[in-house]
Image: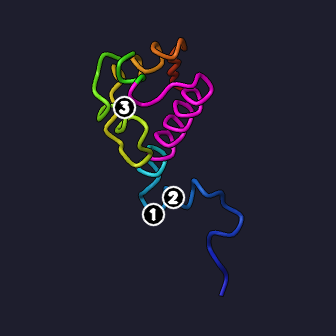
Amino acid sequence: MKNKHIGTDFSDFLKEDGIYEETNDIAIKRVIAYQLEQEMKAQNITKTKMAEMMNTSRAVVNRLLNPDNSSLTLSTLESATHALGKRLNISII
């Protein structure tokens, strides 16, 4: 029996199964959480300190850094990147 997915890329497989967008969103959130966490480590910033710098609660920082939490606002991202001395860059491609 020939596999119909041989020769296609993984995104085609996800699209065919109707889960591409959801999977892509999860991947993006995980990358963002990872990048923020790495920058906090590089700058020696704890979650508590990050919350203070963002003028928010530690619970918000925990949600921001949780790779499985998809409820992320641009305002929170902007606040986090600003607190780290970075700039948020979002593009449509």
Mark 2 to mark 1 CA distance (whole Å): 5 Å
82 on left or right of 72: right
Please tell me whether residue 41 belongs to the stretch shown in magenta: yes
Task: Using the image, tell me which numbered label, if any, was put on residue 61.
Answer: 3
Dot 2 lies on which element? Answer: helix
Q: Are marks 2 and 1 in contact (CB under 8 Å)?
A: yes
Segment colored magenta: 26-48
Q: Along the polypeptide, which appears first: circle 3 or circle 1?
A: 1
6 on left or right of 76: right
Mark 2 to mark 3 CA distance (whole Å): 31 Å
Q: Are marks 3 and 1 in contact (CB under 8 Å)?
A: no
Q: Position of residue 31 (x, y in %)?
A: 54, 39
Instruction: Report crowding for label 3: few under 14, some 14 to 19, many 20 or more residues within 10 A (C-alpha).
Output: many
Instruction: Report crowding for label 2: few under 14, some 14 to 19, many 20 or more residues within 10 A (C-alpha).
Output: some
Q: Position of residue 1 (x, y in %)?
A: 65, 88
Dot 1 lies on which element? Answer: loop
User: Magenta stretch mostly in which secondary structure?
Assistant: helix
Q: Amino acid at mark 1?
A: Asp
**Residue placed under numbered mark 2 in the picture:** 14
Q: Nearer the viewer, residue 80 or 73?
A: 80
